[in-house]
Image: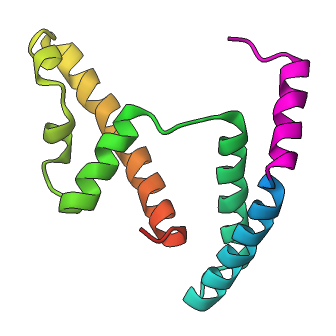
Amino acid sequence: MERTLKMLAKEAKTRMKKGFWEKCERDLDACRRDARAQGISESKAEHYFVGKVTDAIRGDTPDAFYLKVKKLLTEEGEVSDAIGRLTDKAYYATLSYEEKQRYNLELSEKYLEALKRFRRECIFEKS
């Protein structure tokens, strides 16, 4: 569904009425305090926080792959066979040798990006 200017304005008005920005300001202050206490750059914490608020406004949600990686890392930590665990076995069995190589490279790339994101989130979020 395409979001029109009128819809966006209505969403913004709703955020204002429900105290979204006041909550953001309180959360940002808490984020700064936590960063200061942990010895992390406040500007990095602010940048991370702004990204989270932007995602919330856009309605972005983490994709299924990231959630799968996050669950794996949370439950078992970094494991040596992460790519094997994340592989879609049924789909992988249908691929040719070259396609399997490409699939492995793409999966590895996605995993590394998800790992970076997870590490960044762990620094700034208390779980």
In this image, 27 relative to 105: left or right? right
Magenta-drawn stretch, dominant element (helix, strand or loop)? helix
Q: Position of residue 115 (x, y in %)?
A: 38, 53
Q: Residue at x 8, y 15 (%)?
A: 93
Figure check: 86 above or below 48: above
Q: Residue at x 50, y 62 (%)?
A: 120
Q: Position of residue 97 (x, y in %)?
A: 13, 15
Q: Position of residue 49 (x, y in %)?
A: 68, 61
Task: State which quarter of the image contains the C terminus.
Answer: bottom left
Q: Is residue 110 visible?
A: no
Q: How many numbered dots are placed on residues in this image?
A: 0
Chain part drawn in magenta:
1-18
* Towards the viewer: 126 or 91: 126
* Towards the viewer: 28 or 17: 17
Q: Within the magenta stretch, is there residue 85?
A: no
Figure check: 76 above or below 99: below
Task: State which quarter of the image contains the N terminus.
Answer: top right
Q: Position of residue 47 (x, y in %)?
A: 71, 61
